[in-house]
Amino acid sequence: MTEDVDSRLARPVPAEPTAPARLRRQRTGTYRERRGPVVTPATRWEPRYRQAVIGADVAATTLVVVTVGAVMKLRHPDWTVPQLVTLEVLTVLAVACALGLSRVWHPVVLGQGPDEFSRLGKGLFASVVALNLSLLAVGTPAGARLWVFVVVPAIALLVFPQRYLLRRLLHRQRHRGRCLLPVIAAGNPAAIRDLIARTRLAAHVGWRVDAVCTETGTAERGTDLDGVPVIGTFLDVAEHVRRGGYRIVAITPDSYWTPERLRRLAWDLEGTGTEMVIAPGLMEVAGPRLHISGVLGLPLLRVSEPAFTGFRRVVKELVDRGGAALLLLLLAPLVLIVSVLIAVESRGPVFYRQRRVGKDGRLFTIVKFRTMVSGADAQLPALADGNQGAGPLFKLREDPRITRVGAVLRRCSLDELPQLFNVLAGTMSLVGPRPPLPSECAEYAPHEQRRLLVKPGMTGLWQVSGRSDLPWEESVRLDLRYVEDWSLALDAVILWKTIRAVVSGQGAY
């Protein structure tokens, strides 16, 4: 998993197949060389990482099963060793089979977004059913009825953090330029430039565009696009894949790519172990809203409406209210200590209240710990010229109004703890877009108003992506992405990443 990737070099294009062979391929799509996947130092890490994940999941499952089995043996000394061993083996096999059938180890999802954890959760839930059926088939010793409902949650408590740590190790390697998937892009130069920029900005995704093919085989100016060599035309893509061992062929929008040409390219790539990815280039929507179906033999990309109501939203509401109540109970001593420190350092109220805009444009009062001197709002006009915030936001890295205690609270994001009262009251959510000021909403463009379709959150994609360091356009894009692609799995990932963002303090001032 640690080998350095090959340097990007243009590879020679082999001679074009003879006319009869080329015609045979065009007519039937059956002419292709079956050489199998090309394994290079740039892709050798992938099966190793997958094996490491599988081994870690099975090892964690075995460890939990043996530990729980030992505890159950102490509570039920009448259990025989064969009974206990049978129970443990059935559990490991049932969980492993359920995870395998749920495709939690598929290379497409490993290290990629919330779908990895969503599949893992579904796989563990399926293991409950599989294990119950297995135990019914072989019988269980007396007192083992609660076995499933103890061992599976225990496995989840170990497997989820373990999978997250493995992902963090993978992402760290990717930021160092290792463990990346070599990509050859084919399409419109402008769309390819955008793809190159996005892959470089988000190295953790694991894509690195190593080569480009255009319709003419040349760039707009010179022989490369943003430092990536142009190595041929669209007709050369399959041959370069066979010789170069590219892991992904990224097709970006271009008038050349008709359904027939895409089908032929897919045929030519069969047997190479290369994945063909097509970017529709229509809109930035992903996740649970996208559905692919076939109608009259045509592949159709269906985009469903964002889910602002329904069962999942009820679950989110219950998690918000229950989570806020639990956190307030657990953090009550910390809230009391912070309140005393604020009151001792400077005169004024402990809590700062401000009008914000919530779901559907309704105004509400947000509650935070006061981090500035009393009457700080009256000093705002005198500081307006030094504004360092993006867009309509007002921010100063060295704001003279912030108290010493307030600076620490902001650094650790503790000033936002009282917002749990807002979540408990139903005006905010644990996860959502940033709660805007009325003055900010007055400057919103029409598309930016979509941020108000859901409740604002204490944390969100903006919180785990840089906070105040983000450009305004990027902050808006992240909020709109959350609104469009919301899911319970995405909320879980954001909450987990928030802990790391708070500890690092990046963008907090």
Image (cartoon, rainbow, N blue to C red):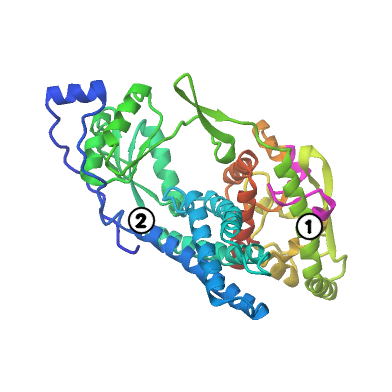
Residue 498 position within the rendered picture, expressed as x and y whole percent measured from the top left: 63, 60
Query: What amino acid does circle 2 point to?
Result: Glu
Q: Is residue 444 left or right of residue 285?
A: right
Of 212 and 340, the residue lying toward us: 212
- Disc 1, SS: helix
For the residues labelled 1 and 2, the Cα–Cα distance comes to 40 Å
What residue is at 31 percent from the left and 53 percent from the top? Answer: 43
Q: Which mark is residue 484?
A: none
Residue 473 position within the rendered picture, expressed as x and y whole percent measured from the top left: 58, 42
Asked if residue 96 is positioned above or below residue 109 in the image, the reply reads: below
Asked if residue 280 is positioned above or below residue 244 in the image, the reply reads: above
Q: Quadrant of residue 359?
A: top right
What residue is at 74 percent from the left and 54 percent from the top? Answer: 319
- Magenta stretch: give its range: 422-442
Looking at the image, the residue that sits furthest to the top is 296
Query: What amino acid does circle 1 point to?
Result: Gly
Dot 1 corresponds to which residue? 322
Q: Is residue 232 visible?
A: no
Dot 2 corresponds to which residue? 46
Image quadrant containing the N terminus: bottom left
Q: Is residue 377 left or right of residue 449?
A: right
Label 1 neighbour load within 10 Å: few <14, some 14-19, many 20+: few
Q: Is residue 120 visible?
A: yes
Q: Decide which of tag 1 and tag 2 comes sooner along the chain.
A: 2
Residue 149 position within the rendered picture, expressed as x and y whole percent measured from the top left: 66, 62
Residue 470 position within the rendered picture, expressed as x and y whole percent measured from the top left: 58, 51
- Disc 2, SS: helix
Of 186 and 241, the residue lying toward us: 241
Judge whether residue 462 is colored magenta: no
